[in-house]
């Protein structure tokens, strides 16, 4: 993957990927058990473009706080959604939140009982509710506690498994009729 649109340095190429996009790509690769090869096209004099340095200077600290969710993760059969993706290690499910909702976040179909949940960057425990159809993490701060992606570590009783089809098929629908 390139940091912009060119494999080598191209002065006119200023279509840089955001830090969030680079981190999202990294999470997606880790989710599938893969590796992320990121190309940095140096200038003719061998120097690294300033925009590459800026992006990597934001990715590096995020990795320092969240690296366990990437470096030691195992393949995760969950593909996530537009606002969240998952990695896991053993019985720990890592929920990577791309768009911070404030107050609470919910995701459906976790078939495994949750024992505890915490914000990974701070270690702060978070409150949660679990039903047969969703997990709802509540009492969150208005602003995201980590940048560019906030991660929750969710400890489960056994290896976490999500089944959103179960929710689609079995969740009662109010007001739905023929």
Image (tube, rainbow, N blue to C red):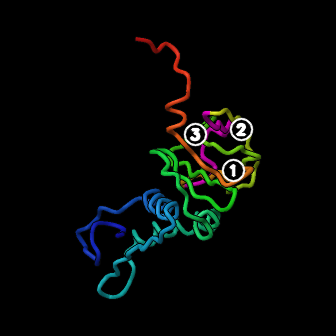
Q: Residue at x 59, y 65 (%)?
A: 74
Q: Which residue is mark 1?
A: 154
Choose the circle earlier in sequence order: 2 or 1. 2
Check the picture and name the quadrant holding the C terminus: top left
Could you tell me how far apart the alpha carbons at marks 2 and 3 are, in whole angstroms? Answer: 15 Å
Residue 10: x, y in percent?
Answer: 25, 74
Tell me the quarter of the picture where residue 143 sits. Answer: top right
Q: Reply yes or no: does residue 144 show up in magenta.
A: yes
Task: Please state which of the two labelled residues, at mark 1 or mark 3, is closer to the viewer.
Answer: 3
Residue closer to the observer: 97 or 113? 113
Q: Reply yes or no: does residue 157 show up in magenta.
A: no
**Which numbered dot is residue 109?**
3
Check contact, mark 2 vs mark 3: CB within 8 A: no
Q: Is residue 78 above or below residue 141?
A: below
Choose the circle earlier in sequence order: 1 or 3. 3
Give the magenta range: 133-147
Residue closer to the observer: 23 or 158? 158
Q: Which residue is mark 2?
A: 128
Q: Secondary structure at mark 2?
A: strand
Q: Is residue 143 above or below residue 31?
A: above
Residue 162: x, y in percent?
Answer: 57, 46
Total marks drawn? 3
Query: Residue lying furthest bottom in this view?
Result: 45
Mark 1 residue crowding within 10 angstroms, few (<14) / some (14–19) / many (20+): many
Tell me the quarter of the picture where residue 163 sits. Answer: top right
Check the picture and name the quadrant holding the N terminus: bottom left
Q: Residue at x 70, y 56 (%)?
A: 91
Q: Is residue 27 above or below residue 9?
A: above
């Amino acid at each position: 993957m390139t940091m912009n649109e060119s494999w080598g340095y191209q002065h006119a190429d200023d279509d840089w990927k955001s830090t969030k996009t680079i981190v999202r790509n990294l999470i997606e690769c880790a989710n599938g058990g893969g590796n992320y090869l990121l190309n940095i096209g140096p200038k003719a004099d061998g120097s690294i473009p300033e925009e590459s340095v800026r992006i990597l200077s934001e990715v590096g600290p995020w990795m320092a706080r969240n690296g366990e969710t990437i470096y030691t993760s195992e393949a995760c059969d969950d593909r996530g959604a537009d606002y969240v993706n998952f990695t896991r290690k053993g019985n720990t499910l890592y929920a990577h939140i791309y768009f911070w909702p404030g107050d609470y976040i919910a995701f459906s179909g976790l078939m495994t009982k949750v024992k505890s949940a915490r914000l990974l960057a701070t270690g702060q425990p978070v409150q949660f509710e679990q039903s047969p159809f969703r997990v709802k993490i509540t009492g969150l701060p208005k602003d995201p506690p980590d940048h560019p992606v906030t991660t929750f570590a969710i400890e489960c009783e056994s290896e976490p498994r999500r089944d959103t089809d179960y929710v689609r098929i079995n969740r009662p629908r109010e007001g739905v009729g023929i």
